[in-house]
Every structure is written in C-alpha cells, then in structure tokens.
Amino acid sequence: MNMEETVARYKEDFELFPTDNDKLEYIFDLGKRHTTLSEEEKNEDTYVKGCASDAWLVGECKNGILELRGEGTSEMAKGMLTLLLDIFSNRPADEILNFDPAKLHDMGVVELLSPVRQQSLEAFLNMVYGYAQKCKEQG
C-alpha cells in the first residue's frame, strides 16, 4: 500500500465517525499503539521543534528506504504520530519527497486540529521531508 492509499484508508476510517469528537477519540485510540524511543534517541537533533507538546522523531535511511520512529508526550501527539508514521515510515525517499502533504487534508482530520496542533504537524512534516532528502542524497 503506497502513501496515497494509506491516506485513503484513514479517510474511510474517519468517515465512519459521525462527530468530530468521535474522530478525535479515534486518534487517541491510535495513540495506544504508540511506540517509545530510547533516552539516547531523545535529543536536540530528534526533538520536533515547534510541536505543541514534547515530541521526537528519528529517521534512518536503509537502502533508500526511510524508517521513522517517534515519541510524543500528549495523547494527541501520540495518536497523530502513530497515524503519520503509518503514512510516512518505511517508504522510499522519492515516494515521500513526491508526496504532496496537502493530501493529508483529504483524511478529514487536519482541520480538527487547533492552529497550534497544525503548526505541530507542519514541524513534523518539515523533519520528515528533511530526513527523506538526506536519505535520497545518500542514495
């Protein structure tokens, strides 16, 4: 399943929920599958600057494939990280770099985020695309 298909799958999931609160609950539920990072991985380089709550994102390039792992401290950050890592992790660098992040709006969840949380999403995406660019250059 490529990135666009993954976004479409989440869009279908979100459409099952009648209210915005139900959609937010789904995000919180996703956070229950949230992973954690080792203390060594949580550092200045991996810290998501501009995120509303503390979050870290680690990117490793393996044979042109970007593997991402992250950790957030709030329920919303955990849920959104889980969702976004499902979309962006374990993908070829070119697929990530060619993906238009505006397509995330198709899921029907970005607009539920407060302006501060939307800035957090932007900060996360900036890090992902930076990791993907480095991965492509390592090629």
Image: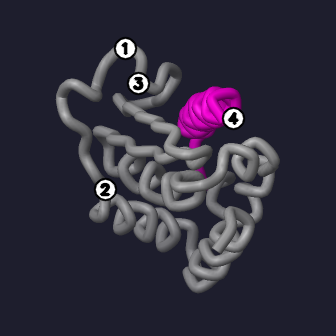
Where disc 4 sits, the SS reads helix
Disc assigned to residue 44: 1
Q: Residues within 10 Å of mark 1 (few under 14, many from 20)?
A: few
**Relative to 33, residue 95 above or below:** above
Can I make out residue 115 in this image?
A: no
Where disc 1 sits, the SS reads loop
Q: Position of residue 53 (x, y in %)?
A: 38, 31
Tell me whether circle 4 and circle 3 mark residues in contact (CB < 8 Å): no
Q: Amino acid at mark 3?
A: Thr
Name the residue at the left extreme. Answer: 39
* Front: mark 4 or 3: 4
Magenta residues (range): 112-139
Q: Which residue is disc 2 drawn over?
A: 34
**Relative to 110, residue 58 above or below:** above
Q: Position of residue 16 (x, y in %)?
A: 59, 85
Q: Position of residue 106 (x, y in %)?
A: 76, 64
Residue in view at x 71 percent, y 56 percent: 104
Residue in view at x 45 percent, y 30 percent: 52
Residue in view at x 18 percent, y 28 percent: 39
The verdict on residue 119 being magenta is yes
Q: Nearer the viewer, residue 89 or 28?
A: 89
